[in-house]
Structures are given as C-alpha cells and as structure tokens.
Image (cartoon, rainbow, N blue to C red):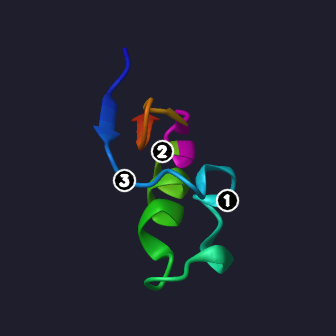
Amino acid sequence: MQLRIADTGPGDIRDDIFDRATSTTGSGFGLFFVETVVDHYGGTVRVEANDPTGAVFVI
C-alpha cells in the first residue's frame, strides 16, 4: 500500500529534503521526523517530481 501526497511548490530542493541541516525556512525537523518514524516502522518515504512543479511524497 502507498500513500501519495502532492504539492505544487517550487520543488527545487528535492535532493536534500529529508536532511535536517539543509532547511532554509524552518527548523528542518518536520520531514526529518517523518522519515525517521516511517523508517522505524519498516516503511520507506521518498520524493518524486510533480511536473511541472512541486513534489510527490510517497510513503
């Protein structure tokens, strides 16, 4: 089973989006925490392009 969540933001930091140290607008904790919890329960989370802009988060 997959949960897919899409947005239409700029999508320009997809490569480092789960890295807490690269946040420029907040603490960087949110997506870091999501990845940590999902991993703890044996799942995966990834980000894909949402053409023409944005991202799709797949859990």
Q: Which image quadrant for residue 5?
A: top left
Expressed as whole percent of the image width and height from the top left, the position of residue 27 reads 47, 85
Q: Which numbered mark, 1 or 2, is in the foreground of this view?
A: 1
Between residue 29 and residue 39, name the one nearer to us. Answer: 29
Span of residues in magenta: 39-47
Figure check: 33 above or below 58: below
Image quarter in which the C terminus is found: top left
Q: Amino acid at mark 1?
A: Asp
Q: Dot 1, crowdedness within 10 Å: few (<14), some or many (≥20)? A: few
Q: Which amino acid does the dot numbered 2 rest on? A: Val
The residue where tag 1 is placed is 16
| Numbered badge on residue 36 | none
Mark in the foreground, 3 or 1: 3
Magenta stretch: residue 56 in it? no
Q: Which residue is mark 2?
A: 38
Quadrant the N terminus occupies? top left
Q: Nearer the viewer, residue 30 or 41?
A: 30
Q: CA distance from mark 3 to mark 1?
A: 15 Å
Q: Earlier in the sequence, mark 1 or mark 2?
A: 1
Residue at x 60% of width, y 50% of height: 14
Element marked by disc 2:
helix
Q: Are marks 1 and 2 in contact (CB under 8 Å)?
A: no
Q: CA distance from mark 1 to mark 2?
A: 17 Å
Please, what secondary structure does the residue beneath circle 3 have?
A: loop
Dot placed on the residue nearer the N-terminal end, 3 or 2: 3
Q: Please provide percent x and percent y for residue 57.
A: 43, 38
Residue at the outermost top position: 1
**Would you name the residue on which mark 3 appears?**
9
Q: Position of residue 28 (x, y in %)?
A: 51, 76
Amino acid on which disc 3 is placed: Gly
Q: Residue at x 44, y 41 (%)?
A: 55
Going from N to C along the chain, the mark reached first, 3 or 1, is 3
